[in-house]
Image (cartoon, rainbow, N blue to C red):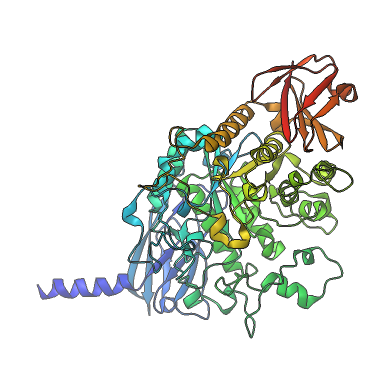
């Protein structure tokens, strides 16, 4: 009995030596066979490490912090199996640790991703729907549920999203982009989850890792795609590794707190000073978000493997990357290239908040602008903030002309020649960081329809923001909480359930019905997905353009004036050709197009030419 007790105590001590292993497991048959495993525990670096055959250790990296040990193994030609790491002290076995290489899904490397045939729906999980009230607060996290606090935790979760997938699908969306779901253990404002504190763990107030994988599975049953919002630039101040840094330069540090200058043009500015450039890349986003140093190979490899692990584990369909161009350019390009090497068809859209087409193009893969400076980000897609700015202003500009009204939209598309892949731009009117479109336009549904019409019919991948399709509004000047309000009906006891036709108000149904009709129509329109575009200089604040391919043609007319406009169609003969009529995709009405078309004030017309 004494021997058994002694064995138990020794074994407990041995296993307690390792507090964390990351990645917690891996997959056999990856394109890159090198796997760097991080072992963390008190004085773990003092041990010698071996691994069971036939796996070989290629490198062992110790840092100035003895609590970390980075062990790289080669998994080439190793089948899915378990291996055993042996830790020795003075050549005597101290303890062992099992590690699993799991079987990948069939054709995992060739997984398809989102493209311009899709419509992306952005939602914030804490504000969408509370599907499991039992996880509203959690003993392992600091901030508790408080729906009465605008910037607090409101209880939305993964189960709430699963419960309303039919609603999202009915809207016409084929992709869901969810703001980050990994643990954010900050004391306040943790609901946005961009200050992550454990990037291998779903925040328990959202659910579990298994719940997240189940969400992907449920979406795939509906032929929908799941996009993970990945953060490469920073973690939260309460991240467990920030509290015990593996290396001093794991994060960018200054003698005193230094915030980024946010001057992203420094990336390609040939006249930039060194001090400005350093503050741009190395300065922190905010005091609660330490800036990660991707130039450190250990950091870069950690982030790369973490991203790949989530793709494999949850069976993901794409990434949106937060503050993409805040990282050091050459480092973030390596991160992106490593992921697309593993998954050649995997789409990644970066948040590049630039307001100039050449500067935005610089960051898209194979950009001719980037080539000038011998730079290639390898980033397939960028977010078109220029179009977003226009869509949040032009419909309040009743008079057109140079630099006003629909001229802004026309001028934006006239610069499309700068992009290497115009179809792979993410286009949007709003997101979780901007005014809501319905606030800007004072809930004038006519203006909402104009904005959505452009998103649905021009080049790129349209993205909408949860709740705007039922008329939700929000003023960013009142704080982020105002643009991130709870979706009505997502909580038991809500007086208004906008998830159902019967529960929506008359006005909410007007918004929803238009949005649903528009984007469900778009699903099957290849001319809109990948076709060519011809547009005409706006006249009297009326903008006309065509999307077409060899089999179909769509004519779009937008009257942004406060007057009825009659448009003579002979000007568009090169696109109209022998077409005589067009079918209004919203009303199904047949309209003659051979002479003139009448447009009501602040109205749109989308015609399938017949």
In the picture, the quarter occupied by the N terminus is bottom left
Residue 508 picture location, percent across and down: 53, 38
Residue at image point 61% right, 64% down: 233
Residue at left 44%, top 55%?
Answer: 54
Relative placement, left or right, of 231 versus 542 is left
Residue 165 horizontal side relative to residue 15, left or right:
right
User: Quadrant location of the C terminus?
Assistant: top right
Residue drawn 86% across and 22% down?
A: 569
| Number of callouts | 0
Q: In this picture, is 233 found above or below 314?
A: below
Most extreme residue toward the front, as rendered?
Answer: 563
State the image quarter where residue 282 is shown.
Answer: bottom right
Res. 23 visible in picture: no
Q: At x 45% / y 63%, what residue is drawn?
A: 149
Q: In this view, does 55 lie to the left or right of 232?
A: left
Q: Is residue 367 left or right of residue 474?
A: right
As drawn, which residue projects farthest toward the bottom? 255
Residue 41 at x, y = what percent?
40, 74
- The picture places residue 482, in percent across and down from the top left corner, at 55, 57
Closer to us: 338 or 518: 518
Seen as rendered, the residue at the extreme left is: 1
State the residue in front, 520 or 109.
Answer: 520
Residue 120 in view of the camera = yes
Residue 546 in picture, x, y percent from top left: 79, 28
């Amino acid at each position: 009995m004494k021997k058994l007790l002694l064995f138990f105590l020794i074994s407990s001590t041995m296993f307690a030596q390792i507090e964390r292993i990351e990645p917690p497991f891996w997959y056999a048959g990856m394109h890159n066979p090198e796997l760097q495993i991080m072992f963390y525990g008190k004085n773990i670096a003092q041990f010698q490490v071996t691994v069971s055959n036939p796996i070989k250790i290629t490198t062992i990296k110790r840092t100035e912090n003895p609590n970390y040990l980075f062990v790289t193994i080669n998994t080439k030609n190793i089948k899915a199996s378990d291996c055993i790491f042996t830790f020795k002290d003075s050549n005597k076995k101290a303890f062992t640790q099992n590690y699993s290489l799991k079987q990948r899904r069939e054709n995992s490397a060739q997984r398809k991703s989102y493209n311009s045939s899709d419509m992306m729906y952005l939602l914030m999980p804490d504000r969408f729907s509370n599907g499991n009230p039992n996880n509203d607060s959690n003993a392992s996290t600091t901030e508790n549920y408080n729906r009465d606090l605008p910037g607090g935790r409101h209880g939305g979760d993964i189960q709430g999203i699963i419960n309303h997938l039919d609603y999202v699908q009915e809207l016409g969306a084929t992709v869901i982009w969810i703001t980050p779901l990994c643990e954010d253990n900050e004391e306040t404002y943790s609901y946005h989850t961009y200050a992550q504190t454990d990037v291998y763990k779903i925040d328990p107030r959202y659910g579990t890792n298994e719940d997240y994988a189940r969400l992907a599975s449920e979406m795939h049953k509906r032929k929908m795609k799941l996009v993970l919002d990945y953060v490469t630039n920073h973690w939260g101040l309460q991240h467990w590794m920030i509290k015990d840094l593996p290396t001093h330069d794991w994060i960018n540090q200054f003698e005193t707190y230094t915030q980024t200058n946010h001057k992203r043009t420094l990336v390609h500015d040939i006249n930039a000073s060194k001090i400005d450039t350093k503050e741009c890349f190395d300065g922190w986003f905010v005091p609660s978000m330490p800036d990660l140093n991707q130039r450190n190979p250990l950091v870069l490899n950690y982030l790369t493997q973490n991203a790949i692990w989530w793709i494999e584990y949850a069976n993901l369909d794409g990434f949106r990357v937060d503050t993409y161009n805040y990282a050091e350019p050459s480092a973030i390009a390596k991160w992106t290239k490593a992921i697309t090497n593993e998954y050649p068809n995997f789409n990644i859209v970066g948040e590049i908040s630039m307001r100039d087409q050449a500067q935005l193009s610089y960051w898209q893969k194979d950009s001719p602008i980037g080539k000038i400076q011998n730079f290639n980000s390898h980033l397939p897609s960028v977010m078109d903030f220029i179009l977003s700015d226009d869509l949040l202003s032009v419909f309040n500009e009743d008079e057109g002309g140079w630099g006003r009204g629909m001229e802004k939209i026309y001028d934006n598309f006239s610069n499309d020649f700068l992009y290497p892949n115009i179809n792979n731009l993410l286009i949007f009117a709003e997101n979780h960081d901007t005014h809501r479109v319905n606030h800007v336009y004072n809930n004038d549904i006519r203006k909402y329809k104009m904005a959505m019409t452009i998103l649905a019919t021009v080049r790129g991948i349209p993205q909408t923001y949860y709740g705007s399709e039922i008329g939700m509004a929000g003023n960013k000047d009142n704080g982020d909480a105002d643009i991130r309000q709870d979706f009505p009906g997502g909580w038991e006891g809500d007086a208004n359930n906008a998830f159902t036709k019967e529960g929506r108000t008359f006005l909410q149904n007007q918004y929803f019905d238009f949005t649903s009709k528009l984007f469900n129509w778009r699903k099957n329109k290849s001319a809109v997905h990948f076709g060519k575009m011809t547009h005409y200089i706006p006249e009297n604040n009326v903008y006309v353009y065509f999307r077409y391919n060899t089999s179909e043609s769509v004519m779009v007319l937008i009257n942004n004036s406060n007057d009825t406009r009659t448009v003579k169609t002979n000007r568009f003969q090169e696109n109209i050709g022998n077409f005589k009529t067009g079918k209004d995709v919203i009303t199904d009405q047949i309209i003659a197009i051979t002479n003139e078309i009448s447009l009501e004030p602040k109205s749109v017309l989308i015609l399938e030419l017949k």
